Image (cartoon, rainbow, N blue to C red):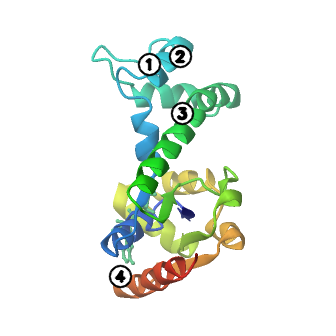
Amino acid sequence: MHVFGLTGGIGSGKSTVTRMLRELGAEVLDADVLAREVVEPGTPGLAAIAERFPGVVGPDGRLDRAKLGAHVFGNDTERAALNAITHPRVREAFMEKLEALTARGVERVIYDVPLLIEAGMHEWMEGVALVWVPRDLQKARLMARDGLDATAAEARLAAQLPLDDKRVHATWVIDNSQDLSSTREQVESVWRAMLARG
Ligand code: ATP
């Protein structure tokens, strides 16, 4: 199995690129989806969170993400405790998906992880595709998509490694600053390069 990474920054167009890759027949696993699955009602993951963070499970038995987020925001100890619960479970879920795909004869998987490089996970990928836009455009698209003012958009950008710093770790850079047809051409070329591996 060949495992490639896909990453970007907030609002840089990773969802857009994922859609294009899937249209080309690529198997894309989404780390955010896995992270939600491991804390669904009835999972050991949610039970562990409920024990460590009392009050974050609502009366409906679901995780109150806003409450949990407010609790760990800006608190490294609490965030580390949360990650210690979720990260191994996400890793395990990822391995299970890989096994299922391998059993189906799939030979390549693209793992879409928003903070791939911040987490150091790019190290164990066979190659990394980065969805890049210039910072001003990233900020403008983020403001337009999420209805944020400039200060709020800046704050979100500041929580991530700048895309220009991520470029150093990328095998392929997809410049998503032009129209979607330009992006699609680059996505096709990256997918061809991935197919050529192995
Ligand atoms: P996040 O990680 O924050 O969810 P993302 O990286 O998945 O963001 P998208 O949601 O794909 O980013 O794109 C951000 C916004 O920019 C969306 O509103 C999308 O429609 C728009 N957008 C993406 N690519 C382009 C493009 N090439 N031209 C114009 N607008 C674009």
**Residue identifier under label 2:** 53
**Residue identifier under label 3:** 89
Amino acid at pointer 2: Phe
Q: Secondary structure at mark 1?
A: loop
Give coordinates of residue 61: x percent, y percent. 32, 17
Question: Does label 4 point to a residue whose CB lies under 8 Å from ligand 1?
Answer: yes
Q: Residue at image x 42%, y 30%?
A: 65
Give coordinates of residue 121: x percent, y percent. 66, 54
Q: Residues within 10 Å of mark 2 (few under 14, many from 20)?
A: some
Q: Residues within 10 Å of mark 4 (few under 14, many from 20)?
A: few
Using the image, tell me which numbered label, if any, was put on residue 136.
Answer: none
Q: Cβ–Cβ below 8 Å for labels 3 and 1?
A: no
Whole-Å distance between the Cαs marked 2 and 1? Answer: 6 Å
Above/below status of 87 relative to 16: above
Above/below status of 65 relative to 168: above
Q: Residues within 10 Å of mark 3 (few under 14, many from 20)?
A: some
Q: Secondary structure at mark 3?
A: helix
- The image quarter in which residue 173 lies: bottom right
Q: Cβ–Cβ below 8 Å for labels 2 and 3?
A: no
Label 2 or label 4, whichever comes before in sequence order: 2
Left or right: 128 as drawn, with respect to 13:
right
Label 2 or label 3, whichever comes before in sequence order: 2
